[in-house]
Image: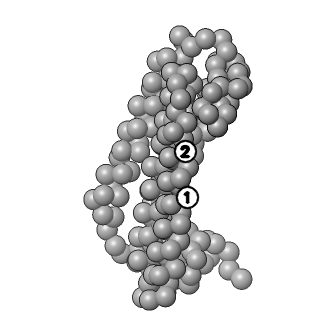
């Protein structure tokens, strides 16, 4: 059995061009992540010593922690978003549901790239909801639930498209 890297090297090269919607989404993800991170940096000095760190299903804070805990949350989300962004540029290296052939490779690669870009959109929504909840002590729960539901839809649709492309 081939390793992921060896298998990717044996696959057809990527020849398609990334579409304008996917490119726009990439830039929106990067811009939104920067804006949210800058907002946290600007607000950090004025945050209270204890900030909400956990919320129940009603969106009410039921856990509090030191102000510095927001730094870890920001670092985690920025790392995840950056990692998915970088990875999305290398669809040839992904693991796919079906077998990659000369016939279906470009469609599979495009679908994989689009799925990761849309996944990043949902991560930014999740990041925004948590930042909103902590900085505004407001209920960002509706946005969090929306982002989780959107993430499930993105993954399900992406896998469905890959299965269809693999049958071609």
Residue 60 vs 143, above or below: the answer is above
Asked where in the image residue 95 lies, by quadrant, the reply is bottom right
Asked where in the image residue 22 lies, by quadrant, the reply is bottom left
Rendered residue at 65%/25% (across/down): 61
Q: Nearer the viewer, residue 42 or 126?
A: 126
Rendered residue at 61%/39% (across/down): 76
Earlier residue among tags 2 and 1? 2
The residue to which callout 2 is attached is 145
Residue 84, given in percent of the width and then of the height, sits at 52, 53
Q: Nearer the viewer, residue 41 or 118?
A: 118
Rendered residue at 50%/28% (across/down): 132
Which disc is residue 152 wearing? Answer: 1
Kindly state the secondary structure of the residue where label 2 is placed.
helix
Residue 43, given in percent of the width and then of the height, sits at 49, 17
Residue 40, given in percent of the width and then of the height, sits at 50, 24
C-alpha span from label 2 to label 1: 11 Å
């Amino acid at each position: 059995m081939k390793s992921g890297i060896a298998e990717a090297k044996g696959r057809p090269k990527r020849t398609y061009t990334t579409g304008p919607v996917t490119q726009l989404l990439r830039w929106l993800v990067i811009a939104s992540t920067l804006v949210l991170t800058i907002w946290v940096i600007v607000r950090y000095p004025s945050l209270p010593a204890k900030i909400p760190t956990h919320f129940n299903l009603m969106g009410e804070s039921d856990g509090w922690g030191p102000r510095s805990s927001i730094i870890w949350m920001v670092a985690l989300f920025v790392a995840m978003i950056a990692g998915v962004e970088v990875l999305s540029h290398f669809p040839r290296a992904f693991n796919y549901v079906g077998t990659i052939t000369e016939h279906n490779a470009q469609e599979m690669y495009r679908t994989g790239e689009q799925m990761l870009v849309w996944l990043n959109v949902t991560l930014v929504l999740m990041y925004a909801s948590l930042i909103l909840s902590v900085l505004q002590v407001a209920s960002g729960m509706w946005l969090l639930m929306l982002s989780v539901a959107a993430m499930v839809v993105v993954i399900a649709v992406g896998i469905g498209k890959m299965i269809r492309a693999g049958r071609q």
